């Protein structure tokens, strides 16, 4: 084999390696991005719910509550 044949094998091997790496890592990247977005949406809704429960608790403590909505016993500062 001449040097040209080794060069060809090296180039083909490197290209195959990068193609395989991309084929394996792109789905992982997409999954992680999707899960990150879902986590942000959950966090926003969870914080809004904790804020709503805090307001209801303060209203009950002040005697201003019109409806006795149960907060489920979850501490208001659980997200901090």
Image: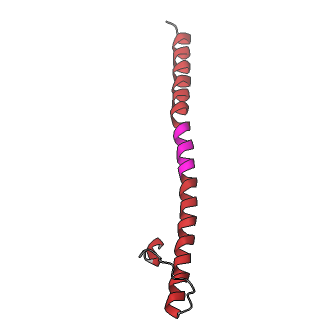
Q: Is residue 25 above or below residue 67?
A: above
Which x, y percent locates residue 2? 52, 8
Magenta span dominant secondary structure: helix
Which residue is pictured at 52% across the width and 80% down the height?
A: 54
Residue 31 located within the stretch drawn in magenta: yes
Q: Nearer the viewer, residue 39 or 51?
A: 51
Name, please, the residue furthest toward the left: 73
Name, please, the residue furthest toward the top: 1
Which residue is pictured at 54% across the width and 29% down the height?
A: 18
Residue 32 located within the stretch drawn in magenta: yes
Q: Quarter-wise, where is residue 42 in the image?
A: bottom right
Q: Quarter-wise, where is residue 66 in the image?
A: bottom right
Q: Nearer the viewer, residue 19 or 37?
A: 37
The number of numbered discs placed on residues in the rendered structure image is: 0
Range of the magenta residues?
A: 27-35
Which residue is pictured at 53% across the width and 47% down the height?
A: 32
Which x, y percent locates residue 65? 55, 87
Q: How is the image coloured?
A: secondary structure
Name, please, the residue furthest toward the bottom: 62
Q: Is residue 43 above or below residue 35?
A: below
Which x, y percent locates residue 69? 51, 78
Which x, y percent locates residue 22? 55, 33
Q: Nearer the viewer, residue 22 or 7?
A: 22
Q: Is residue 16 above or below residue 25?
A: above
């Amino acid at each position: 084999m001449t040097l040209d044949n080794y060069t060809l094998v090296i180039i083909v091997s490197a290209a195959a390696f990068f193609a395989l790496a991309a084929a394996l890592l792109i789905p992982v990247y997409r999954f992680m991005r999707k899960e990150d977005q879902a986590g942000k949406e959950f966090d926003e809704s969870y914080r809004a719910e904790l804020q709503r429960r805090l307001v209801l608790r303060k209203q009950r403590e002040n005697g201003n509550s019109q409806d006795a909505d149960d907060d489920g016993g979850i501490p208001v500062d659980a997200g901090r």
